[in-house]
Image: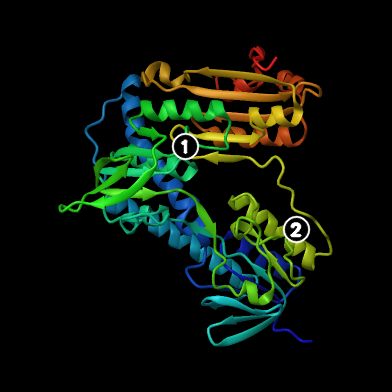
Amino acid sequence: MEFDYDLFVIGAGSGGVRLARMSASYGARVGIAEEEQIGGTCVLRGCIPKKLLVYASHYPHEVEDAKGFGWTFGDGALDWPALIAAKDREIERLSGIYVNLLAQSGVGMHAGRATLVDAHTVAVGERRITARHIAIATGSRPSLPPLPGIEHAITSREALSLAARPARIAVVGGGYIAVEFAGIFNGLGSRVEQFYRGAQILRGFDDDVRQFLAAEMTKQGVTIRTGASVDAIERASDGTLGLRVGGALAGPYDAVLYATGRVPNVEGLGLEAAGVALDARGAIAVDPYSATSVGSIHAIGDVTSRPQLTPVATRDGGLLAATLFGGRRIGADHAWVPSAVFSQPEVATVGLTEARARDVHREVDIYRTSFKALRHTLSGRDERTLMKLVVARDSQRVVGAHMVGRDAGEIIQGIAIAIRAGATKAQFDDTIGIHPTAAEEFVTMRQKVADQAG
């Protein structure tokens, strides 16, 4: 059978674009469809714009810290519209780069929503397009719970493009998106209260990291209310918002940001008609080679239950391209994936938490330190840094590294190479540190934490 394309990709985010470009580089005829702007969540309404706002939110602290080093600056003022306009210009530039890369790769671009018709056919509007292989890379979106007044809430998507900075904002949720936006708005001058129904923020992260970050965020002025389940959002006659929490009304707020989870974009794709199976989470079920239950249909990125990280999606897109058209069958490997939370202070981690390591390896050695960074000996800021190594006692392999502090993501990226390569604690110890840096603490920790597990 003659197909219109060798591969048709649904969704032009980071993963879909990488898959399309790499497949085209192997000589495949590739088409891609996108119903919104090309670039996906990361470029348009996730990692990139969020990080730009994180940078913006750091400046007030930098100015405050400068006083300890002899600098004096006048009162600053944030021009919110100018910040958002600058962010939007950069997003447009990046989206344009993606469009040009696809065009230069010879990928056929189709504007509109694509849906599955059958195992080898997609519909884009009224047009039917056939392909030997179809890949779904439609990502995920924020989810909102069905509670009274939820229509008054915004999500991370709207938070990146507000017309004005809210003077008072409630952030509901305890995951990485919630703590990142709490830090952004706090740094930009908003009064921030964060509500989380669990016992501590950042569920799934190392317990020391969770407690340490919560304490540091509190010192910076974020009010964190744990064990707080929101029952309703109420709008007052003056337009302000309140949260009904356990019978009491918290507020008033100028905005309520919900960051309580994301769901895969699977609705209305025609998956059921095509026979594509979903997993228990409602995401597309895939094997290590990104194949679905239908042989000709594949899926990558956040529409699956793989780690919800852009580098994972792009890596898996490249691997799928190699498997389909590059003559190499390579399965996805999601062990030792590093990640960062651009909270304030920053969090970064690779490998196992202490709790998980005790489950897997039973006996572990823990090395942990916290300290005031050198810059704050003059700045006077009450901010500390946490570093932690988790070591399997029998092999002495370092199986986890965790950090809370300035540039944590930059530091853990390098540590991740060593951990993925199987480095032992002795090899960390034998490595010369760079002085004076915070990073050197990862190779100078010698004193084990007393093993309370016996």
Which residue has dot 2 on it? Answer: 287
Residue 69 sits in quarter: top left
Q: Quadrant of the N terminus?
A: bottom right
Residue 57, compared with residue 318, is above or below; it is: above
Which residue has dot 1 on it? Answer: 198
Q: Are marks 1 and 2 in contact (CB under 8 Å)?
A: no
Decide which of 119, 279 is in the foreground and name it: 279
Q: Is residue 223 left or right of residue 203?
A: left
Residue 327 rendering spot, x and y as whole percentages: 84, 64
Residue 218 sits in quarter: top left
Decide which of 317, 443 is in the foreground and name it: 317
Q: Residue at x 78, y 67 (%)?
A: 324
Dot 2 lies on which element? loop
Which is more N-terminal, label 2 or label 1? 1
Q: Residue at x 58, y 31 (%)?
A: 206
Residue 177 rendering spot, x and y as whole percentages: 46, 45
Residue 10 sits in quarter: bottom right
Residue 428, compared with residue 422, is above or below; it is: above
Q: Is residue 150 left or right of residue 138?
A: left
Q: Amino acid at mark 2?
A: Asp
Q: Residue at x 47, y 18 (%)?
A: 372
Q: Amino acid at mark 1?
A: Gly
